Image (cartoon, rainbow, N blue to C red):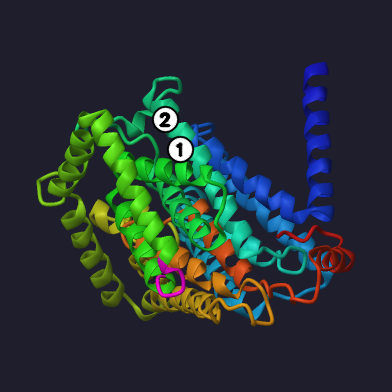
Amino acid sequence: MIIAFAQYFAILVAGLVLFLLMWHRPGWAISATISLAALLDCFQVGARGVDMGVNLYIDDAAGAVLLLTVFVVLIRHRKGIPLDAVPCALLLALVALNFTRGLGAFGLRAAGNYTRNLSMFAVPAFAIMLLRPVVSVETRRLARWLGWAGIILCAIAVLRWAGVLSMPVELEDNLREVVRALPSDYAMVIGQAFIAVIYLQIVGRRAGWWWAVAGMLGVAIIFLQHRSVWVATAAGLGWLAVRTARSFPVPWLSVAATGAVAMGLVVVADPTVATTVTSVVSANALETQGERSTWEWRVQGFVEATDRVFAGDATDMVIGPPAGWAANSNASFASKHIHDRYVDTLANYGVFGLATLIVWLGVLAKRASRGRGRTTTKRFRGESDSPLLQALLLSELVYLIPYFGGVLQGASLGLIWLATQHKGLPLETGHFAQVRTVSQRTNEFAVR
């Protein structure tokens, strides 16, 4: 009995601390929740979930905390939902609507399990966007956050390859010479970190050790062997080069020269490294054309799912079928578990859901494109950072073609949106004056 009382008391204290954190430091609460959920999922803690009529996982608990924090922010600061965040809110409303429709038709377990896909993508983004009244994120600060996140994930991957950390069962693969040590969602964060660190070196002339960080991130991306991450990272980095090459030609030449010298030194020191890298890249490239390629299988699922949407009744075509329909369907696995955010939204939330998703991403792309370039005569600092936001967003949009994304991808979109809201500092206004103004108004730290 004493043990049970101690457990209830610990839960009560933890709940009180969490509520106080939500009330006084909602930015910290959301950041800690997303980071903890991502790390626990990476280490497979709570992977089996808890059966409470429907399987509940760490991500579900994190989503509940995020929504509660958002509710506290709205109540305390008496702010409405920003217009740019309305499409994301509509997606969550659509999830709730189809969940309610699915309860009566398929039961709690089926309906609950099949609403997780989109909700765990949209909830983190929605929560971060609604932090706007209390948190301001400067773009280069976001880039440094991504850099540190990439370093942490690289360290986890290296420790798994070295055998210090156990390799999750689902990642073990006898088909590859080097095992994929991280799932694709985490590898995509490393890809975005690589883009961010390169940008910091181009425009910010960061400390020299960040060059080593960039090299480590690039090597990790190759050996993680997620082709979707390769393509998405290349797309973002290519866009960044196009947007900044004219303004920063010398730094880009320095990047190219540094990379060439580093690769040359590695080849001279250990020629087998170049052979290994070449074999990894070529093996993965050939796999796309072989029997082990899943792309054709995925495309067949896309076609089947799309045909099913437009062959159904008007309600299902507009807002999608009731949640949980797939549990009792004889449709193929590829058309029920769709590896594409856009097609998955169409299949499960209809034309309205897909249109809402596209509007949300389109509004975000428009906001990320409002920068005016870098000059010394501009009124505000930070206007040169729009190429980074555009590159990060483009890499995310490309990644969502082969994958539906999760908590980390939703958080990335939310942070990009929050960074587009940052107005920059007037040249005549000091850093501490701006921090003091924001802090006095909102009782929350201004993040720069």
Q: Mark 2 — residue?
A: 158
The amino acid sitting under disc 1 is Cys
Q: Residues within 10 Å of mark 1 (few under 14, many from 20)?
A: many
Q: Mark 1 — residue?
A: 154
As drawn, which residue projects farthest toward the left? 290
Secondary element at tag 2: helix
**Between 349 and 223, the one nearer to me in the picture:** 223
Compared to residue 277, the image places residue 207 above or below, namely: below
Residue 253 within the segment the image draws in magenta: no
Measured as percent of width and height from the top left, residue 15 is found at: 79, 41
Secondary element at tag 1: helix
Residue 247 within the segment the image draws in magenta: yes
Compared to residue 247, the image places residue 251 above or below, namely: above
Q: Residues within 10 Å of mark 2 (few under 14, many from 20)?
A: some
Position of 60 with respect to 397 (left or right) is right
Q: Are marks 2 and 1 in contact (CB under 8 Å)?
A: yes
Q: Quadrant of residue 127?
A: bottom right
**Between 105 and 342, the one nearer to me in the picture:** 342
Measured as percent of width and height from the top left, residue 419 is found at: 61, 67
Q: Residue at x 25, y 54 (%)?
A: 334
Question: Which secondary structure type mostly characterizes the magenta part of the structure?
Answer: loop
Q: CA distance from mark 2 to mark 1?
A: 6 Å
Locate the N terminus and report the quarter of the image it occupies: top right
Position of 257 with respect to 194 (left or right) is left
Compared to residue 290, the image places residue 381 above or below, namely: below
**Between 200 and 87, the one nearer to me in the picture:** 200
Locate the C terminus and report the quarter of the image it occupies: bottom right
Write down the region rendered in magenta.
245-249
The amino acid sitting under disc 2 is Val
Q: Residue at x 63, y 57 (%)?
A: 141
Q: Visible in this render: residue 139?
A: yes
Q: Residue at x 51, y 75 (%)?
A: 360
